[in-house]
Amino acid sequence: MCIGCTQNDLSSNLDNPSLHNNSSFPLGTAVRFKPFQKDAQLRRLQQHHFDSYTAGSDMKMNQVMPTEERFDFSIVDSIIAYAEEHNQRVFGHNLVWHSSTPEWVRQKAKQNPKWLLPFLKGYIQSYVGRYKGKVHGWDVVNEGLNTKGAGFRTDTIWYETIGLEYIEKAFEYAHEADPDAILFYNDFNIERDLEKFNTMIEMVQDFQKRGVPISGIGFQMHIRMDIPNDIIAYTLKTAAETGLHIHLSEVDIIFNTHDDTRGGGIERYTEITPEMLVAQAKKYEELVKIYMTTVPKDQQYGITFWGFNDRDTWIRRFFKMRDWPTIYDENLKPKPAFYGFLEGLKSNQISSKSNLN
Ligand code: 9MR
């Protein structure tokens, strides 16, 4: 019996099969720790369905080092304790991301460009070293490519100050601090923008040739209903040919569209219909099947949702638009998408971890 749970909590939590018990690879969702701590229903669902924990924000640079050169590891320590208690893998998101670089780092790098690379080294080595053996893998660099098309993102303090080398340096520092951690390059739209994808693959192949310790590719996989499956299959298969781990790291599937900027939602659909729900279920099922058939089993690092319910999804907040991107609805009830995703997982029955519930 769950102390503090209402009847509603229990029925919505336990009626459905556990996703991770039907999966042969780890399944996760992004979590914002503070609201999560206060939400018993959400915690029970997370524990029921997932065996991997990704912090939606809590592990980023502006969260663990909000003020000058002083770490605050309190929330990360709580996350590790939670994951240990519930037997979950912790995935570290992320070490370097232009968008979560604190303002004080930007200012200091502008005043003294020589300071930034040693800072990066100290930051990564202290952080990764502290959680050696506890954080299983890291998004070492997040979104280092241009938003659209070929080439690298140049309007970041990291590129402007250190040059492109900041990417491989980050991998080297992380590997030195924890040689067993799986180290990812993570980005969005690489499943659909072939120019962007090609830049990423060229970088990975170059790293492999030169011994830069990259061990995984993260496809954020924020997709839309109309992104063609054959393009997704092509990019996943080609990425898997590098031999690296492949993580679908931030999955959600929207109906509407946006221009990739805050507030940039373009609402074509303002209501969700039964037909749309069924189509979304099919898309989730197909996505899992594509992952399982194009990525060899020992490279399947896992699938992580970027939030698993339409109540909390970042899409509505960030793009300021209605949408229904996830597998649970606003009332924390499973949508057809949940069953579609489950069907996809079950198509791999023979090799599943267990099919007990
Ligand atoms: O969903 C995250 C949101 O809650 C945070 O405020 C934001 C800034 O830290 O980051 C969001 O997550 C992003 C992720 O870290 C990288 N890929 C895009 C995600 C959605 O913006």
Image (spheres, grey):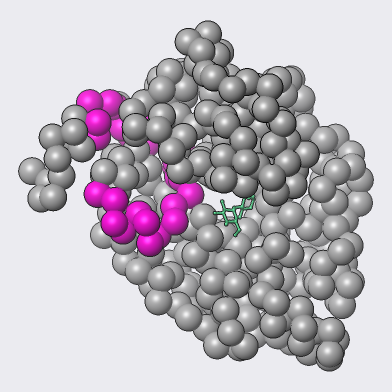
Q: Using the rendered view, name the quadrant where residue 193 is placed.
A: top right
Instruction: Point out residue 55 in the picture as x, y percentages from the top left corner.
Output: 48, 57
Magenta stretch encompasses residue 23: yes
Which residue is rendered at x = 89% and y = 62% of the image?
A: 154
Relative to the observer, which residue lies in front, 101 or 187?
A: 101
Q: Is residue 244 at least partly visible in the picture?
A: no
Relative to the observer, which residue lies in front, 10 or 129?
A: 10
Q: Answer with left or right where residue 289 lies relative to residue 354.
A: right
Residue 174 vertical position relative to residue 343 in the rendered view, above or below: below
> Looking at the rendering, in which quadrant would you find the N terminus?
top left
Q: Is residue 144 at least partly visible in the picture?
A: yes
The range drawn in magenta is 12-40
Which residue is rendered at x = 37% and y = 56% of the image?
A: 35
Instruction: Point out residue 63 in the picture as x, y percentages from the top left corner.
Output: 54, 71
Total marks shown come to 0
Q: Using the rendered view, name the quadrant where residue 219 is placed.
A: top right
Q: Using the rendered view, name the quadrant where residue 75 is placed.
A: bottom left
Residue 271 vertical position relative to residue 73 in the rendered view, above or below: above
Residue 26 vertical position relative to residue 59 in the rendered view, above or below: above
- Which residue is at the far top? 275
Instruction: Point out residue 178 in the picture as x, y percentages from the top left corner.
Output: 56, 72
Magenta stretch encompasses residue 195: no
Which residue is rendered at x = 45% and y = 43% of the image?
A: 312
Relative to the observer, which residue lies in front, 173 or 104?
A: 104
> Looking at the rendering, in which quadrant would you find the C terminus?
top left
Instruction: Point out residue 172 in the picture as x, y percentages from the top left corner.
Output: 71, 72
Which residue is rendered at x = 51% and y = 13% of the image?
A: 273
Q: Answer with left or right where residue 11 lies relative to residue 298.
A: left
